[in-house]
Image (cartoon, rainbow, N blue to C red):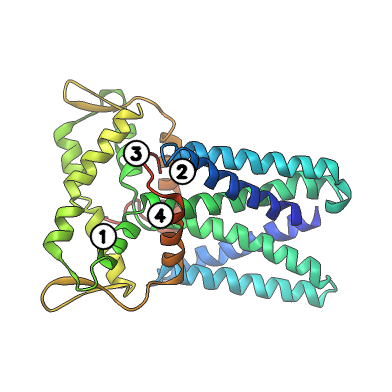
C-alpha cells in the first residue's frame, strides 16, 4: 500500500513539474511522463524491498492495478479542469459575482463554435479527415473508446445518448 | 492474492447492485446514488470480513483499494451520463464507413445535440447555478469542495495551451 501511494506521489510531482516546465504546451505528454515515472518507482521499490508487499501477487499484480486505478483518477481529475465544459461554464459564472446575462454566456460558449473547434482539433490530430465535403475516420484510435463507451451506455442506461 | 480477489468481488457486487437499481429506476442524482451504493456495499462487505476475523489493517487496505476502483468507475460513469461531443462524432463517422458523412449531415447531427445547454441545465439541476429574474446566471452559495479543488489545480498548472 505504501509503495502504491508513494508511486502516485511521484506521478503527481513529476507531472506537475513537466507541465510547468513546458509552460502548459504538452499537457498529455506530462501525464504520460508522470505515469511512467510513478510506475518505474513502483517496480523498483517492489524489486528492492519485496518483503514489504509479501508476495508476488501483491507486489506485481495487485499493487500495479491499484497504482493504475489511482493514476486514472488523478488523470481524470486534472483533465476535468482542462476539458470539462461544465467546469468551464461554472468558472465563467463564478467570475461574475453580479451574475452573467444568458446572452453573454451564449456568446462565450457558443454551441456552433465549440463544435467547429472540436472538428478542427480532430482534423489537426489526424483522427478525422475531410475530402470532397465529406468527413470520414482517418485514424481509428478513438473508435474503440467510442464503441466501449456507447456499449456501456446501452447496458447501464438503456440508451445511447442523453439527447434520445 | 486474497487481497486482490476480495476487493474485486466486493467491486463486482457493487456494480451488480448499481445495475439492478438502474434497471428498476434511474435516480435523479446519478453520481450521488452511485457513491452511496459503493459506500453501502463496501461497508457491508468489510463488516462481514471483520466479523469473520480479518484484521483491521487488512480491512483498511481492502477498503482503500476498493475505494480507488470505485472512484475509477464513478469517473468513467460521468462519460456515460453525459455525451462527449468528440466521441459522439467519432461514433457517427465510424458507423458511416469509408464513404463518410457530408458536412451538412454532420452539422445537423451536432445541432441535434446541444451539449452546452445540456451542461448548463445539469448545473441548474444540481442547484450549483440559478437564473435571476433579470435572466442572469449566478452561482448559488459556495462552490462544492470538488470544484474548489479542480479550480485550485488549474492555478497550479497555469495556462494549458494544448491537449486535455
Q: CA distance from mark 3 to mark 1?
A: 20 Å
Q: Residue A113 location, x and y as percent? A: 18, 44
Q: Residue at x 46, y 37 (%)?
A: A22
Q: Residue A27 location, x and y as percent? A: 45, 41
Helix, strand or loop status at disc 2: helix
Between discs 2 and 4, the one toward the N terminus: 4
Q: Are marks 3 and 4 in contact (CB under 8 Å)?
A: no
Say if labels 3 and 1 share a chain: yes
A55 vs B5, nearest the viewer? A55
The residue carrying mark 4 is A81
Q: Are marks 2 and 1 in contact (CB under 8 Å)?
A: no
Q: Which mark is residue A124?
A: none
Say if labels 2 and 1 share a chain: no
Name the quarter where the N terminus of chain A is drawn: bottom right
- Circle 1 Cα neighbour tier, 10 Å, few/some/many (<14 / 14–19 / ≥20): some
Q: Is residue A3 visible?
A: yes
Q: Which mark is residue B91?
A: 3
The residue carrying mark 2 is A148
Q: As displayed, is residue B79 above or below residue B61?
A: above
The picture quadrant where one finds residue B148 is bottom left
A49 vs A98, nearest the viewer? A98
The residue carrying mark 1 is B118
Q: Are marks 2 and 3 in contact (CB under 8 Å)?
A: no
For mark 4, name the chain: A
Q: CA distance from mark 2 to mark 3?
A: 10 Å
Amino acid at each position: 500500500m505504501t509503495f502504491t501511494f508513494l508511486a502516485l506521489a511521484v506521478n503527481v510531482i513529476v507531472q506537475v513539474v513537466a507541465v510547468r516546465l513546458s509552460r502548459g504546451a504538452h499537457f498529455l505528454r506530462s501525464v504520460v511522463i508522470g505515469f511512467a515515472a510513478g510506475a518505474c518507482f513502483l517496480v523498483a521499490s517492489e524489486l528492492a524491498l519485496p518483503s514489504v508487499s509479501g508476495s508476488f501477487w501483491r507486489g506485481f499484480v495487485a499493487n500495479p492495478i491499484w497504482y493504475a486505478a489511482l493514476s486514472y483518477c488523478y488523470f481524470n481529475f486534472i483533465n476535468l479542469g482542462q476539458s470539462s465544459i461544465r467546469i468551464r461554464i461554472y468558472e465563467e459564472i463564478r467570475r461574475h459575482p453580479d451574475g452573467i446575462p444568458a446572452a453573454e454566456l451564449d456568446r462565450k460558449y457558443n454551441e456552433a463554435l465549440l463544435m467547429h473547434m472540436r472538428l478542427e482539433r480532430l482534423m489537426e490530430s489526424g483522427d478525422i479527415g475531410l475530402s470532397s465535403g465529406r468527413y470520414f475516420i482517418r485514424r481509428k484510435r478513438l473508435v474503440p473508446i467510442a464503441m466501449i463507451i456507447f456499449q456501456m451506455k446501452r447496458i447501464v442506461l438503456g440508451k445511447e445518448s442523453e439527447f434520445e | 492474492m486474497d487481497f486482490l480477489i476480495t476487493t474485486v468481488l466486493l467491486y463486482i457486487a457493487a456494480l451488480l447492485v448499481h445495475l439492478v437499481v438502474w434497471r428498476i429506476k434511474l435516480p435523479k442524482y446519478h453520481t450521488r446514488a452511485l457513491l452511496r451504493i459503493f459506500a453501502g456495499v463496501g461497508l457491508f462487505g468489510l463488516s462481514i470480513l471483520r466479523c469473520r476475523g480479518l484484521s483491521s489493517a487488512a480491512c483498511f487496505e481492502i477498503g482503500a483499494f476498493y475505494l480507488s476502483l470505485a472512484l475509477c468507475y464513478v469517473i468513467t460513469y460521468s462519460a456515460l451520463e453525459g455525451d462527449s461531443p468528440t466521441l459522439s462524432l467519432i461514433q457517427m463517422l465510424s458507423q458511416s464507413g469509408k464513404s463518410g458523412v457530408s458536412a451538412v449531415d454532420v452539422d445537423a447531427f451536432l445541432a441535434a445535440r446541444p451539449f452546452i445547454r445540456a451542461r448548463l441545465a445539469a448545473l441548474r439541476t444540481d442547484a450549483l447555478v440559478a437564473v435571476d429574474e433579470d435572466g442572469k446566471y449566478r452561482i448559488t452559495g459556495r462552490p462544492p469542495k470538488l470544484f474548489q479543488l479542480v479550480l485550485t489545480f488549474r492555478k497550479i498548472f497555469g495556462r494549458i495551451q494544448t491537449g486535455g
